[in-house]
Amino acid sequence: MKDANTQKARVSASATFWMSLLVSSVMVHGLPLQARANQVPSKEAIAKVPPSPFSLETPTDVPSLAVTDQAPPEVKFQDNSSSPLGWTGIDVESGFSPLERTCSMSQRINSLADERLNAECEVNKVTSIAELTSHTREINPNLVQDTVSIPPPTISQANPVESFAEIPTLEVPSVAELSSGDGDGDPNTPMSQVSNVTQLRDVSPGDWAFEALRSLVERYGCIAGYPDGTFRGNRSSSRYEFAAGLNACLQQIERIITTGGDGFVTRQDLETLQRLTEDFKTELASLGTRVDKLDGRVAFLEDHQFSATTKLSGLAWFDMTGATAGRNVKVEAINAASPDVRFAGRGADGRPLVQEVENPNITMSGLTWLTFNTSFTGKDLLVTQLAAGNGLSPANQFASAGLFNTFGTPFLDQTAGPNNGFAEVVIHDLFYQFPVSKQVQLVVGPRVNWHRFFDNNAFTFFLTGGSTFNSNGTTVHDPIDRGSGVVALINLSKQFDLHVGYLGENNEFLPAAFGFNTSSNPSKGLFSGTNTITAELTYKPSSTANIRLIYSHNTLDNNGGVVSAEPIYGVADDGQGGRIKPATVNAFGVNFDWLITSKFGIFGRYSYASTEIDPSTPGRAGGNINSQSFQFGLGFPDLGKQGALATLSFLVPFDVLSGRRFLVAGGGDGGTQYEFELTYHYPITNNIALVPAFYLIGNANNFDSNPTIYVGNLRTQFSF
């Protein structure tokens, strides 16, 4: 009996013990669960704690009007014995531990209902996405939409600038700055520590974060993608690039929630966005730091810029040139004076006077251009170009009167003024270009460069291609180089352009004291001196080919009673040493360039001109000097290096077809001068280039009896 009572007491005590233990478990684990179910997490807690894929709790500081209704998640129970995690494991589907399962299902449902009710009661407490992501900074989402293309530094001294939009440049952070965490670009700065190796990886297609952002982008239009509104990102991006896209989605979704715009934001998307924000909080914070630094740099540049409307660029050249011939060279001149002041004349027999000159010495010279491009509206362009140089190329030593700076003379081995060899600052270009309509632009000014707008060629552009005066441009159409007047640039279609212009002579090379620069001289004016009317039609059959048809009607002033301007290479009189009236010229030409492959192209020109000679002496018969010129060449782009260009060309600058008797210089003994030119433009950097060139001149000055002349030039070119 005692044993029975003892056994009964033991059973009772055991039952009491286990009951107490059960009650304690319920009190310890069940009640806190209910408290947690009814507790609304604070904004700080939401911002600091990343959402778990196993959690049933959702941010409640979101207006219910912007959230779609979702059914409460189903709570599932499982046998503890079958759980691979044992009695302390977490049910992956429900998120509850076994001890939490001691609550009844009704208690669970009530708890979830209370949680949802509490969430809906918080409708007046709207928390913006910006508050939930305290490390983000608002930036323009277009920064991740657009692609900014900055061409390498280019020189536009000879070709017209179609719009001022091509002129401004943008200072951007260096690669080192974009790669460093703090944006200062110092490679010696220690790298910040990372807590996970994933922070060192790019975000690739297939990663959860990549696909999650892609889904948000396509659903809410965070980033402007393709015309159909889709985002087709299929390339890996750096974490900073990814953060920029994420920031755009943060702002877009915040706008939807705040303004109640079209569409709804689901809880699932908010949780996804919250998790992404937490995973990339370092990069989001860095975006703000970089924007701050860029703002500071922009402010500094604005305070220290040269001008708010003007951009300054420059070019500088060093030229080393040598010229030689096997023996003395015949030139038509009254003496063997300096080639820039040689004059022509006839002897008692009426024949042109001829001299012989010796080989010159090697020279080294320099030339600088400073260009100020100014815009007042963003679509117009005021160009002011200053120049100074001291070049007097030794090849000129072999030139007859009137042929100064022609054959074998490097274009950039020159003096930018009338006093050759003296480095005087002169106004090289001065004109204003502005749009009249979408298809028409006008260029007007007192010193307009004819070669900017007419007779261009991709392979003879003076900065990169053929480099002599004869090769850079036509030897027939342009008697003035620069002048006062107007040029109309008309875009007829994608394939056709028309340029038409009138210019009166105003050339920095010609001294006004000797009657030149007639447009600014009151005795001649804009229309009574040397002038040209030019029309050029350009046909572009493809993106790699151009064909230009040119017509010029020129008036050549009779300076000193003779004529010496293109198409006359030399000096013309009445054939007997007498004076002539101003001459008129009609010239026709064709110019083409064709890049056949990416590594090979061809180019060429042909021109024909007829110059009317009208003697001033009564009763003396006049006539015409008919002449032609032509050039054909080969171009080899990127030869040896990207950006390099080699050219080889053959040209005849002045072939007299008839009327040789009117030439007191330039006619020679009936021969035809020809030239071979080989140049190689080799860029060392984007701003420095070496340009070696070699020229061979046969039958110089149209004398068959003259020896062959050899000219070598080495040019160092700087752009800034």
Image (cartoon, rainbow, N blue to C red):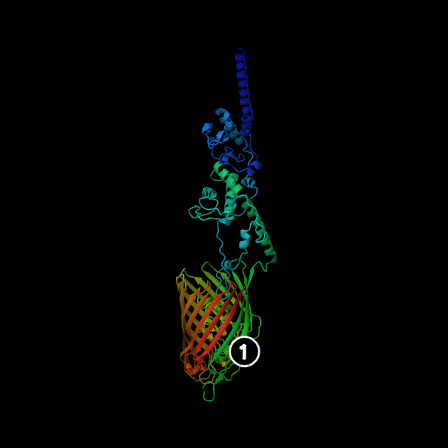
Nearest to the observer: residue 542 or residue 595: 595
Question: Residue at (46%, 61%) from the top-left corner?
Answer: 440
Judge left or right: residue 630 versus residue 26: left
Image quadrant assignment for residue 391 = bottom right
Q: Where residue 540 appears, x then y in whole percent?
A: 40, 63
Q: Where residue 689 appears, x then y in whole percent?
A: 50, 66
Judge left or right: residue 122 versus residue 590: right
Q: Where residue 26 appears, x then y in whole percent?
A: 54, 24
Amino acid type, callout 1: Phe
Question: Residue at (46%, 59%) from the top-left corner?
Answer: 437
Nearest to the observer: residue 226 or residue 360: 360
Direction bottom: furthest residue: 348
**Mark 1 highlights which residue?**
514
Question: Residue at (41%, 59%) from the top-left corner?
Answer: 494
For residue 112, above or below residue 46: above
Nearest to the observer: residue 103 or residue 220: 103
Q: Where residue 188 appears, x then y in whole percent?
A: 58, 53
User: Dot 1: what SS?
Assistant: helix
**Where, quadrant-wise, is the C terminus in this rendering?**
bottom right
For residue 374, above or below residue 423: above
